[in-house]
Image: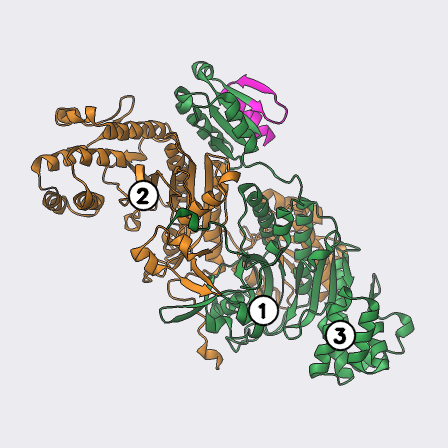
Chain colours: A orange, B green
Amino acid sequence: MSKKQINTKVLSGFVELLPKEQILFDNIKNIVEKSYKSAGYVAIDTPVIEKSEVLFAKAGGDTEKQVYRFTKGDNDLSLRFDLTVPFARYVSEHYNDLVFPFKRYHIAKVYRGERAQKGRYREFYQADIDIVSEDSLSVMYDVDIISTLAKTIENLCNLCSLGNFKMKISNRKIWDGFFEEFSISGEQKASIMNIIDKKAKITAEVFDTELSERVKNPNIEKLIKELFELEFIPNVGVSIPEKYHSDFAFINNNEKMKQGIRELEVVMKSLETISKDRFVIDLSIVRGLDYYTGTVFETFLENYPEFGSVSSGGRYENLCDNYTDKKICGVGGSIGLSRLFIPLIEDEKIENKWDGLLDVLVLPQGENCYLKATEVKNQITECMNGICKTSIIYENKKFKKLMEYANKLGAKYVVIIGEDEVANNTISVKNMITGEQQTVSINDALKIIKEKI
Amino acid sequence: MSKKQINTKVLSGFVELLPKEQILFDNIKNIVEKSYKSAGYVAIDTPVIEKSEVLFAKAGGDTEKQVYRFTKGDNDLSLRFDLTVPFARYVSEHYNDLVFPFKRYHIAKVYRGERAQKGRYREFYQADIDIVSEDSLSVMYDVDIISTLAKTIENLCNLCSLGNFKMKISNRKIWDGFFEEFSISGEQKASIMNIIDKKAKITAEVFDTELSERVKNPNIEKLIKELFELEFIPNVGVSIPEKYHSDFAFINNNEKMKQGIRELEVVMKSLETISKDRFVIDLSIVRGLDYYTGTVFETFLENYPEFGSVSSGGRYENLCDNYTDKKICGVGGSIGLSRLFIPLIEDEKIENKWDGLLDVLVLPQGENCYLKATEVKNQITECMNGICKTSIIYENKKFKKLMEYANKLGAKYVVIIGEDEVANNTISVKNMITGEQQTVSINDALKIIKEKI
């Protein structure tokens, strides 16, 4: 077969970055990991390949169609399509060895064979956090998840100059209690929730028309619209504006709505101590129908509305019901790392965040200087205790060519070892930003580099 | 289907660690990454899924049988079985955008459906480094690869108290030149190289018998045994002991052997500046037949001979010949992270290296203290700039139960916020190692924690 016939491009929907871009993406991933870790979440690492019966215990429909599924020997296998199902399996399997409440993070690739398009990948990184426990878990853990994600996204926005973001918070119990009040359930409830979920993406007119078509009751329609005005007032709490109080007198006897509002109040009060304007109540946040049972939230970058929610999650009641009779409840959230950052990196929208592939490049001038230069390189590496990226180039090329190489790699310092330097036991250090060059002893050179890096 | 019918164990040959073990494995992985980075290697990240025609352009036989291969739509796909083939594809695809010599590291999972047994996994981490360039590459880069791996393994041995290790170094040109000298090639050469490769694993008697059966010439057999005594003498160089010099007079006219010895000498001279006794010449290191063309090396832990070589590699001439007409030569090596460390972790042979899942645990005593405690937790996280793992527990349980939780997570400090502390705006800090407890202002508490962590 001719070499030309083998196409070396990655498959459609898959991502592969150049070293410069990769460093940026890895920095982003490291910031997420550091933020999760510092908030007390611990790492897990599960296999990419799972038994299909494990993955499909709950999933179905579209998810199942997208999965990379195959057999090997007698095994029906699949690549994981999210990090939640493997987490549920992990908790079920290791239940006796885990300490609850269990706070875990998992940053890893997942696989979905969906139609490839910009920002939709078939292999992509998710960065999940969850807190789970048996039977019950204080609503304060919802605060832990939301504030950890907020802090993480703040760190990312600072690194990448992405500007401001808002987190919109709701509680599913409020809607569940509301619909119970008016005996709305099943398909009708699903269809109303569906249009509530779309509220932010459609015009007010379309929303009103769709809502009235689905609710078919002007009074309930009015109440739904009033409920959207639920607000948090610092030092007071979460409540419906006073003008609607008489309309909502029924809440006093609706335990579910009351609980939802109480939970939302606890969450908002705690988050308010972190930021006065980052966290807002928005009852149009619904996040699917089955899974979530309390707090739900989504996150929006003010400068990049086109990304939709960049971090979402919420509270659930029974994570492991497919695998164990233990009732494991929890709260979690996720940042879609690839979906957000790969387009930003590829479109060069994260400017000037490149830090160079190297800190120091050692340049021996001619083969007679190789041994000395290698020793110097080793001394720099040793002395900097792993924090300085130091390399060396052994090429019999003109000095200008070697400096071009240093520039392409973004080296901050070049250490030149020529025959003079070998003879005098000195080295020349060139600051690539200022252009300044000094010939000094190796110890002085180490001091210069150590100060600046 | 009953819940009991879904087995939540990972598939045979796959690995999943508990959080305590995972932290240790991740520390190990981080040390490798930090060591590679500080030696000027840059990260790449390629898809786990490749087109089968890409993976099988070179492979065949056993490798092909072990691969996880499947179709999705019209695509014939496979999971990567090593990191070298994807690297060759990466270099071919991005040739115009890379700066040569290109030094890359890649630490990632690879997949082989081989028979599962202890220390052999179907999904496992490899940690590769390579340096490639077009047409030619100084033998000093062999030193770069070997010394980087040596430094990395030294760091790992220090972290895990694994003791001493040796790196055995050879050069394939010496054997290739030797066999050319005596017109030994094809199957006979392969069969002799094969028994040379096994020399360290069999008795001297078995080796002698096998060697003479394959060589079928007492004179050549004698020369082979003498060649094993090739030695490096500091300030002199690499040579055959003087007593054999007359036997090896032919080397003066054998360019390949001379070049192999010269290369080995350059490598040994440079490595000697790093350590006097870590690097030894051992011509029984062969490493397969086709791929390597110069320097080859293997690494052995003195306390764990049962692992065999824990890090191997060498020099190759044509990495990308299946994908491009460009001649890309290089040198590389790899550490088998999972193969080495998963058994050590599972058998608890790496003692006492556990650093705790947490640094600081904040314990509010009762719901009235939740808000204050949450603020304190956020202050600690903020003030420690991400280097301190801080968590909080919201449980209405007895103090003793909460302290048990702190102990299980290995917290170094517990910060207690009770109603007294809320009233007086103080916090109590308990050092979990000394048992000492102080009630102080939040600022003093931050100082105490900052000093110690």
Identify residue for label 3: B174
Judged from the image, the secondary structure of the residue bearing numbered disc 1 is: strand
Name the chain letter of the residue that bears numbered label 2: A
Q: Is residue B238 magenta?
A: no
Query: Residue A217 appears in which quarter of the rendering?
Result: top left
Q: CA distance from mark 2 to mark 3?
A: 66 Å
Check if mark 2 and mark 3 are on a common chain: no
**Which percent across, then down, holds residue B82?**
55, 64
Q: Amino acid at mark 2?
A: Tyr
Per the rendering, the mark at residue B133 is: 1
- Measured as percent of width and height from the top left, residue B369 is found at 42, 21
The answer for how far apart the CA atoms under marks 1 and 2 are is: 53 Å
Q: Position of residue B59 (x, y in %)?
A: 55, 73
In the rendered structure, which amino acid carries the disc numbered 1? Ser
Q: Residue at x 64, y 40 (%)?
A: B353
**Residue at figure coordinates x 34%, y 52% from the top left:** A59
| Image position of A326 with respect to B239: above or below | above
Tell me if residue B449 is in the magenta stretch. Answer: yes
Circle 2 — which element?
loop
Q: Could you tell me how many numbered marks the image carries?
A: 3
Tell me what residue is drawn at x 42 percent, y 61 percent: A15
Label 3 sits on a secondary structure element that is helix
Task: For label 3, count other residues whose C-alpha is less than 10 Å away and answer few (under 14), some (14-19) or many (20+).
Answer: many
* Chain of the residue that carries numbered disc 3 in the rendered image: B
Please tell me which of labels 1 and 3 falls first in the chain: 1
Query: Which residues, given as a range, are shown in magenta?
Result: B430-453
Which callout, 2 or 3, points to the residue nearer the camera? 2
Q: Is A248 on the left or on the right of A442, as rendered?
A: left
Do the numbered discs 1 and 2 sit on residues whose CB atoms are within 8 Å?
A: no
Residues flagged by tags 1 and 2 on a common chain = no
Above or below, B211 relative to A392 = below
Let me know if residue B263 appears in the view.
no
